[in-house]
C-alpha cells in the first residue's frame, strides 16, 4: 500500500571546489604548468602575470573573495529563478582523467586512471559511481583490492557521508572485476587467477583449471600435487597440463603498467627540493616554471560597476554581470586551490622529511625507516587518501639523487634482535647476496632464506620469492651463466 511520509537526513556532496582541490593534488610538477595555462585559456577572468594592483592592496585572496561574495548577494536579488538555477548548478567535469607521467610528449595513463576511464563509460547511479571510485582508489599497484569491503564502506560513510550496503559493494566490485586488465580488483590470488580463467574460451583444459583452483587451491598453492592426484583421481601428465594453463596467467595484473613505465625513458621534474645546510634540512617546492596568475581587474570592475547601480542596468548588462560573477568565482576557487595544494604538498613532504631524516642527511638506504601512509596521515592530520594522492607521481630532489615519494613508503620487518627494519633495507641485502653469488651455481629461494636468516632477517621463503620478483631477479635456474 502506498503512503507518504516525511523524513530528514543529512547528506554531503563534494562541491566543485573540493573536487578541484583533489584533482590538483594528483597533478605532478611536470603537468602543473599545462594545467594552469589550460585554466587561463578556459576562464577569461584569469590572467597571467603578477597582479598589477598587488603593491597597492594588501588584501588576501580570502578577503577579496569575501567581499566579492557580498557583491554576489546583491546581484542575486536581481536574478530570475531560471537564471539562478542555470548558473548556480554548473556541473564540474569529474571525468577528466589525471595523467600519471609524461614521456617526451606521450602521456601514459596509470592503472587507476585506466580503471577510472572504464568506470566513466558505465551507466551507473550516483551511489554506484561513488562506490566504484572508492574501490578503484584502494586497488594497489599489483592490481589487488587487499582492503576489506567493510573498510571501504566505512571510508565512503565517513568521507562522502553515504551509507552503502554490502550488496551494493559486492555488486560494484563485480563490475570493476570485469574491467581490463583481466584479474584486476581481485581480493586474493585465487580470485585473480579465476577471474582470468572465467574470461578464456571454455576448453576442457580451462574448465579443469577452474575446477582445480575452486576445489584444491590450498593444496595447489602448497604444491601438494600428490594429494590432488589422489583426491581428484587424475594422472600426473594431466595435472601438469592443467598447471601449465594456470602458469600462463598473470598473478599481478597491475604490473603491466609498472613494467611499461620502467621500460620507457621518463622525463622527471622533481616537485620538491631538499637541501642540507649546516646539518639542517631545508625543504622547498620546485615552482620555477609555474606561471603567476591573478583575477582580471576588468571583470572585477564590471561587477563593481553593476553593484554600484543595479537598478539602472538593462538585461544585457545584467547577463554580463552574471557571466562575470561565474568566471570570477571560478578564478578565486582555482587560485585558492593552488595555494591549498602547495600547502598540503609542503606539509606532507615535511612530515616525510622529518620521519626519514636520517636518510635525507646521509643518503644511506639502510637508514630508511618502515613507513606507511597511515604514519604520515597521523602526523599531518590529513586523510590517508590525501597522502596517497600527494605521494603519487611526485618526486623529490636530494643531494643523493631524485627519488619517487612512493620509494619511502614500505612495510616493516623484524630482525632476530627485535629491531624493526624497512623492507627496502631487506631487499637491498637480498640484492647484495644475489649479486655476490656463484653465477655457475646460483642460490635457490630456500638457500636465500637461510642466508638472510643468518644475517638476522627473519624472512620466509615465500617472502624471498616475492622480493626477488619485485627486484626483477629471475629464479635460480635462469640466473646460471
Image (tube, rainbow, N blue to C red):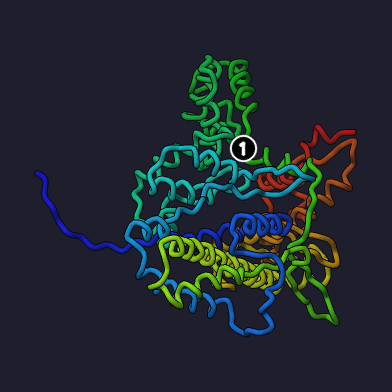
Visible residue check, residue 5: yes
For image coordinates 49% across by 61% down, the residue present is 323
Q: Nearer the viewer, residue 321 or 288?
A: 321
In front: 115, or 458?
A: 115
Q: Which residue is mark 1?
A: 253
* Quarter of the image where the N terminus is located: top left
Which of 136 and 209 lies nearest the eye of the viewer? 136
Label 1 CA crowd tier, 10 Å (few <14, some 14–19, many 20+): many
Report whether residue 160 is seen. no
Q: Position of residue 478 (x, y in %)?
A: 81, 32
Image check: 93 left or right of 13?
A: right
* Position of residue 343 measured from the top left corner of the image (x, y, whole percent): 63, 72
Q: Residue at x 59, y 69 (%)?
A: 298
Query: Which quadrant would the C terminus be assigned to in this image?
Result: top right
Residue 264 appears left or right of 136 = right
Quarter of the figure with residue 270: bottom right
Amino acid at each position: 500500500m502506498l503512503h507518504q511520509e516525511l523524513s530528514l537526513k543529512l547528506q554531503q556532496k563534494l562541491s566543485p571546489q573540493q573536487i578541484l582541490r583533489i584533482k590538483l593534488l594528483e597533478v605532478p610538477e611536470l603537468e602543473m604548468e599545462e594545467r594552469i595555462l589550460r585554466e587561463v585559456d578556459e576562464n577569461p577572468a584569469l590572467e597571467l602575470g603578477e597582479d598589477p594592483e598587488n603593491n597597492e592592496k594588501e588584501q588576501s585572496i580570502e578577503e577579496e573573495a569575501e567581499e566579492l561574495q557580498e557583491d554576489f548577494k546583491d546581484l542575486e536579488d536581481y536574478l530570475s529563478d531560471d537564471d539562478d538555477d542555470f548558473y548556480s548548478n554548473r556541473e564540474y567535469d569529474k571525468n577528466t582523467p589525471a595523467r600519471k607521467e609524461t614521456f617526451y610528449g606521450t602521456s601514459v595513463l596509470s592503472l587507476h586512471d585506466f580503471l577510472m576511464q572504464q568506470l566513466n563509460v558505465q551507466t551507473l547511479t550516483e551511489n554506484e559511481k561513488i562506490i566504484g571510485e572508492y574501490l578503484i582508489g584502494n586497488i594497489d599497484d599489483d592490481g589487488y583490492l587487499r582492503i576489506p569491503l567493510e573498510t571501504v564502506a566505512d571510508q565512503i560513510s565517513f568521507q562522502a557521508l553515504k551509507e552503502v550496503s554490502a550488496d551494493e559493494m559486492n555488486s560494484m566490485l563485480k563490475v570493476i572485476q570485469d574491467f581490463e586488465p583481466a584479474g584486476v580488483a581481485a581480493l586474493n590470488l585465487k580470485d585473480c587467477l579465476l577471474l582470468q580463467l572465467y574470461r578464456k574460451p571454455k576448453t576442457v583444459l580451462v574448465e579443469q583449471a577452474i575446477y582445480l583452483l575452486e576445489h584444491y587451491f590450498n593444496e595447489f598453492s602448497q604444491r601438494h600435487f600428490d594429494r590432488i592426484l589422489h583426491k581428484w583421481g587424475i594422472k600426473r601428465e594431466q595435472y601438469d597440463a592443467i598447471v601449465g594453463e594456470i602458469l600462463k596467467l598473470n598473478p599481478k595484473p597491475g604490473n603491466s603498467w609498472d613494467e611499461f613505465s620502467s621500460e620507457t625513458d621518463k622525463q622527471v621534474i622533481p616537485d620538491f627540493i631538499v637541501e642540507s645546510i649546516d646539518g639542517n634540512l631545508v625543504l622547498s617546492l620546485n615552482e620555477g616554471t609555474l606561471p603567476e596568475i591573478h583575477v582580471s581587474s576588468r571583470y572585477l570592475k564590471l561587477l563593481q560597476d553593476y553593484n554600484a547601480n543595479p537598478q539602472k542596468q538593462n538585461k544585457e548588462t545584467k547577463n554580463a554581470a552574471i557571466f562575470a560573477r561565474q568566471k570570477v568565482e571560478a578564478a578565486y576557487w582555482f587560485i585558492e586551490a593552488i595555494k591549498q595544494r602547495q600547502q598540503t604538498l609542503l606539509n606532507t613532504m615535511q612530515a616525510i622529511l622529518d620521519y626519514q631524516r636520517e636518510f635525507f642527511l646521509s643518503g644511506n638506504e639502510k637508514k630508511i625507516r618502515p613507513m606507511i601512509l597511515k604514519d604520515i596521515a597521523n602526523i599531518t592530520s590529513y586523510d590517508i587518501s590525501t597522502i596517497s594522492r600527494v605521494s603519487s607521481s611526485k618526486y623529490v630532489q636530494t643531494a643523493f639523487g631524485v627519488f619517487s615519494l612512493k620509494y619511502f613508503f614500505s612495510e616493516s620487518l623484524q630482525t632476530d634482535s627485535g629491531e624493526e627494519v624497512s623492507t627496502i633495507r631487506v631487499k637491498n641485502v637480498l640484492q647484495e647476496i644475489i649479486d655476490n653469488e656463484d653465477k655457475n651455481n646460483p642460490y635457490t629461494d630456500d638457500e636465500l632464506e637461510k642466508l638472510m636468516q643468518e644475517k638476522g632477517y627473519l624472512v620466509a621463503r615465500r617472502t624471498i620469492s616475492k622480493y626477488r620478483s619485485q627486484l626483477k631477479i629471475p629464479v635460480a635456474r635462469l640466473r646460471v651463466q
